[in-house]
Image: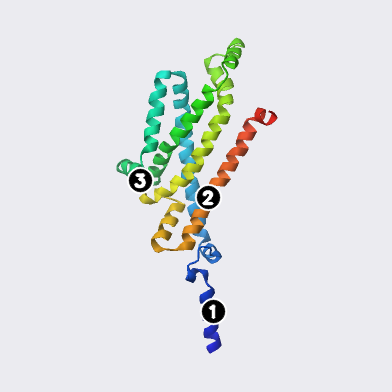
């Protein structure tokens, strides 16, 4: 009987959950399903937000490039949006969309615009005027010049902005926990409140891994879409 009690006491002592260790494989084993579900939600928030950001930033960037009068307004507005504290921005959106994932996606989308628009503008402005003149001489109209010449040459700069937007969105998505839709941020917040070290570290590491994986995938996509850079 005494031996059994000693063994039980030793098992409890060796339990990383009981010791509240930062690194605890037992936590990952017992909460793996919850971590996976939170990661999926985090990925969904990131991809939808960045995707919507690209859909909005592309016409804004082209408009700002073509119409100089629109440049200052576009860059100024997107920059002002980026300076609004994330918690404040989410609570400004809540009255319109409620405590939902749509609130988080809207806020994250607005944050992506300044990076996406600026990098697209840098890429379009960097196209050699001689290349444009040559394309016009070959018969390209305004639309063909944009889609067949300017945007492909601006792609490296635009992809660099997209990579920054994705990584920053992975980090910012955790703030969505203030409205109950933060993906891995919900787990991090709960762990901080309970001083549960393994929970905080595990969710934080997953955020980093998710950001790194998405960044590497975009880097691979950029290499595939810009074969002339590999040749150079």
How far separated are the C-alphas under marks 1 and 2? 34 Å
Mark 3: few/some/many CA within 10 Å (<14, 14-19, 20+): some
Residue 219 appears in view: yes
Q: Is the residue under label 2 in contact with that under label 1 (CB below 8 Å)?
A: no
Total labels: the figure holds 3
Q: Secondary structure at mark 2?
A: helix
What's the residue at 56%, 26% (across, down)? 154
Q: Is the residue under label 3 in contact with that under label 1 (CB below 8 Å)?
A: no
What's the residue at 52%, 22% (across, down)? 125
What's the residue at 37%, 47% (across, down)? 100
Q: Which residue is mark 2?
A: 208
**Dot label at residue 129:** none
- Depth check: give the residue in front, 88 or 224: 88
Res 90 quadrant in image:
top left
Q: Secondary structure at mark 3?
A: helix
On the image, the x and y values in percent for residue 199 come to: 47, 60
How far separated are the C-alphas under marks 3 and 2? 21 Å
Q: Is the residue under label 2 in contact with that under label 3 (CB below 8 Å)?
A: no
Disc with the residue nearer the chain's start (3 vs 2) = 3
- Depth check: give the residue in front, 8 or 94: 8
Mark 1: few/some/many CA within 10 Å (<14, 14-19, 20+): few
Q: Which residue is mark 3?
A: 87
Q: Which residue is mark 1?
A: 10
């Amino acid at each position: 009987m005494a031996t059994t009690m000693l063994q039980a006491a030793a098992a409890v002592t060796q339990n990383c959950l009981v010791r509240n260790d930062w690194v605890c494989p037992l936590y990952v084993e017992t909460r793996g399903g919850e971590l996976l579900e939170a990661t999926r939600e985090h990925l969904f928030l990131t991809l939808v937000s960045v995707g919507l950001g690209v859909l909005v930033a592309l016409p804004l960037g082209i408009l700002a490039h073509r119409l100089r009068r629109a440049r200052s307004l576009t860059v100024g507005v997107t920059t002002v949006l980026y300076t609004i504290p994330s918690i404040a921005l989410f609570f400004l959106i809540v009255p319109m969309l409620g405590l939902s994932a749509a609130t988080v996606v809207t806020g994250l989308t607005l944050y992506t615009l300044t990076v996406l628009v600026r990098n697209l503008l840098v890429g379009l402005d960097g196209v050699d005027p001689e290349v444009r003149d040559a394309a016009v001489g070959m018969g390209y109209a305004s639309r063909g010049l944009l889609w067949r010449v300017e945007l492909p040459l601006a792609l490296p700069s635009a992809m660099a902005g997209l990579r920054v937007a994705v990584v920053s969105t992975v980090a910012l998505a955790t703030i969505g926990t203030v409205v109950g839709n933060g993906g891995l941020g919900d787990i991090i917040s709960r762990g901080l409140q309970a001083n549960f070290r393994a929970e905080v570290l595990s969710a934080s590491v997953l955020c980093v891994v998710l950001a790194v994986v998405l960044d590497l995938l975009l880097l691979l996509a950029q290499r595939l879409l810009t074969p002339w850079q590999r040749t150079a």
